Image (tube, rainbow, N blue to C red):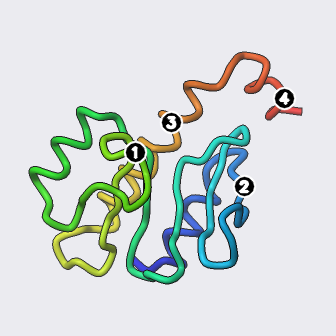
Amino acid sequence: MTIEDARIYCLSKPHATEDMPFGDDYVAFRVGGKIFAGLPLEKPNLLVLKCDPEMFDEMVAQYSAIEQAWHWHKRLWMQIHLDDAKISSELVKYLTDQAYQLVYNKLTKKEKAELEL
């Protein structure tokens, strides 16, 4: 999967938006104003995703291409090396879905209702 594929997939999630809150070298993907994924453009082979701490431990143990995300909370954010042959597009999509759902589920009822407007 390329970073453009990852970008398109992140934006395919309902109500997903993108912006560059940290400068021209980092694209963030949000739902309800909260970040669920990011693409550090200075490292074009990485995708950063929000994650459950239990999932983090499991993914890091199972895949050498998944590690703690640089400059993010060490057990709540993972980075995936998209150019690793052992990382399938299906796995990246699954982890992206999990990241999106984790953030979406923490939105308040009011925030969710505002998304539907």
Which label belongs to residue 17? 2
Across and down, in percent, residue 114 comes to 84, 29
Residue under label 3, please give it. Answer: 101
**Label 1 packing within 10 angstroms: few (<14), some (14-19), many (20+):** few
Q: What is the CA distance from the residue labelled 4 to the residue labelled 3? A: 17 Å
Mark 2 to mark 1: distance in Å?
22 Å
Judged left or right of residue 25, residue 42 is left
Label 2 CA crowd tier, 10 Å (few <14, some 14–19, many 20+): some
Q: CA distance from mark 2 to mark 4?
A: 14 Å
User: Disc 3 or 2, which lies upstream in sequence?
Assistant: 2
* CA distance for labels 4 and 1: 28 Å
Q: Position of residue 102 (x, y in %)?
A: 48, 33
The front one of 8 and 62 is: 62
Q: Decide if residue 88 is on the left or right side of residue 79.
A: left
Q: Which residue is mark 1?
A: 73
Q: Residue at x 23, y 68 (%)?
A: 87
Which residue is depicted at the point 55% across and 35% down?
Answer: 103
Q: Is residue 92 left or right of residue 62?
A: right
- Provide the secondary structure element on which disc 3 rests: helix
Which amino acid type corresponds to the residue marked 3 in the rendered image? Answer: Gln
Kindly identify the residue that appears in the image at 68 percent across and 78 percent down: 24
- Of labels 1 and 3, the one closer to you: 1
Tell me which amino acid carries mark 1. Answer: His
| Residue name at image x 64 percent, y 25 percent | 107
Q: Residue furthest right?
A: 117
Labels 2 and 4: the sequence-earlier one: 2
Q: Amino acid at mark 2?
A: Thr
Q: Is 108 situated above or below 48?
A: above
Query: Pointer 4: what residue?
Result: 114
Q: Quadrant of residue 117?
A: top right
